[in-house]
Image (cartoon, grey):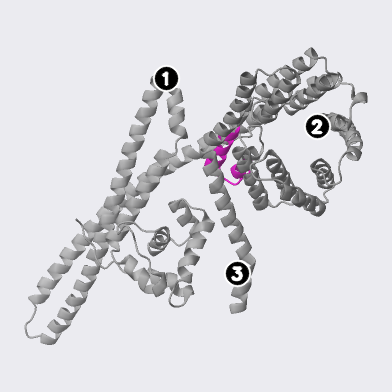
Amino acid sequence: MKNIYTLIVFLFTPFILNASELDSLMNVLQTDINKRPAYDAQKENRLENFTKLIKERNLQGEELFYINNQLIKEYEAYSYDSTQHYIKKNLQLAESINSSKLIDYSRLRLTNILASSGRYYEAIEMLNKVNAANFEDEQLIDYYQDNIKIFTDLSVYSPLNDNYQKYAAIAQNYTDSLIPLLGSDSEELLSIKEKEYRDKRELEKCMQINDIRLSKAKMGSRRYSLITFERSLIYQLQNNTAQRKKYLILSAISDIRSAIKDNASLTELALILHKEGEVELAYNFIKVAYDDASFYNSRLRFTLISNILPVINQAYYIRGEEQRAKMQNFLIIISFLSLLFILSLFIGYLQLRTLRKAQAKQHESNLYQKQLNKDLQQINIQLQEVNDDLKEANLVKEYYIANFLTICSNYIDKLDSYNKNVYKQITNQKVQALLASSKSNKLLAAEVKEFYHNFDSTFLHIFPHFVEAINALLNDEDQIILKNKEALTTELRVFALIRLGIKDSSRIAKLLRYSVNTIYNYRAKLKNMAKGDRDSFEEMVMKIDATHVSMD
């Protein structure tokens, strides 16, 4: 039996650790999303320094061209319009100084940005204007890469198989021409090899090359974002959703930290979360991706996200409607249970009154039957004990239901107030204010905090010695000391719900708003601190009594 248990732990531990790692990375991503304005401000500061440099030094000619080129690199994944603006300025500047080398360089840069936004016809027209015969190796590399980008994208987005084959063949020809110009360990060559292995489904070789590329990239750079995104594609082909999510999260974090607005990782992550039923998280991520696409203003990226956003938005709306419907049904059930409780009290009262009448008659019975009187007295003592237990149970239920009805009533008032506020803002045409309010998590956070407070205070009122009883089951070095005597820790809340009969981890996770894996970890953590047999720990918790009940 011990060997079987060890085998189970060995098999499932990687999944538990993997889930914990994903939870940690997801927390980092959400934190970085909240810090986006700070990362964007750093980008804007760098851009401002370049523009100040141009004004202060009154730069002209080639010197101005190269400073503009630095601005283009900063804007390249940040703002499509600004990138195009400075490339065109450089093109005009190159034409004014009659530099064919700088003219062709600017045309290649313009081709790249046009292709990235899906304007392939214009990109091809621009490429036709350059004279590739006079290019040196560096310009030839840019020329071939632009052609590869255009025809690869055309093959991907082409609805006709014949066109797909044609464009893919053209892209491959340019790739064959590019490879001899690249260094054996260059990023460009490694990227080409990785794609070739990925297309051939030689995923082990593909992963080895990605490892090399990733070891040379730095978190917070555009290269790191791209390489981790391409690594997620490998895991997608392996049907490894957990690892795919991990590297999409890492790519998205890198995009945010480097203020990259032309991104794809957050959109892909939102789609996965939507399929997994994490509708609220998917909605939040796709909104951020939509905002980035709007800011960057690339027609291709904006179109792709615009096709996805309504699907997730609709699912988010449906989830909200379902939750409201569940709340209404819950209120109906509570009302029905309250009526049943009142009816049971009335029946209990009638039974108690009948019992008292029977006891009175019994006392008036024959004084000569002493033995019978003793037996009846013993029965009365037992009945009194049962009545005391029933009274305690009724008081517990009365207090719990009274608190619960108060909470339900408060939620009805809050819902009514919220509806009135929404109606008022819509009537006053304050849609933007309403949208801003709906984005905020403050209301949800406050409600969760209040839920925890109500749960803790109600439970501790019914089980005032619960923490002492739990500590009695734990090792001396693992004793739990509450900073606030009226507030439970997360571990204690988990076992408080278990004491109330809710043992399913998925139900506990839903009530406490944690992932199921996190609940498993909390349960395991407290079990590992038990004095005795950890497997019987939860049974011991279920034996903790409500030793004091007060109806203050």
- Residue 9 is labelled as 3
Q: Is residue 426 magenta?
A: no
Q: Residue at x 6, y 83 (%)?
A: 367
Where residue 107 sits, quadrant-wise, is top right
Q: Amino acid at mark 2?
A: Lys
Among numbered discs 2 and 1, the one appearing first in the sequence: 2
Give the residue at mark 1. 429
Q: Is residue 121 left or right of residue 39?
A: right
Q: Amino acid at mark 3?
A: Val
Regarding residue 363, the answer to whether it shows in the image is: yes
Q: Amino acid at mark 1?
A: Gln
Among numbered discs 3 and 2, the one appearing first in the sequence: 3
Label 3: state its secondary structure. helix
Give the residue at mark 2. 149
Q: Nearer the viewer, residue 59 or 266?
A: 59
Numbered disc in front, either 2 or 1: 2
Among numbered discs 1 and 3, the one appearing first in the sequence: 3
Q: Nearer the viewer, residue 128 or 447?
A: 128
Circles 1, 3 touching at the beta carbon (< 8 Å): no
Q: Is residue 288 magenta?
A: yes
Would you place residue 237 above or below residue 468 in this image? above
Percent across and percent down for residue 318 are 52, 37
Most frequent secondary structure within the magenta stretch: helix
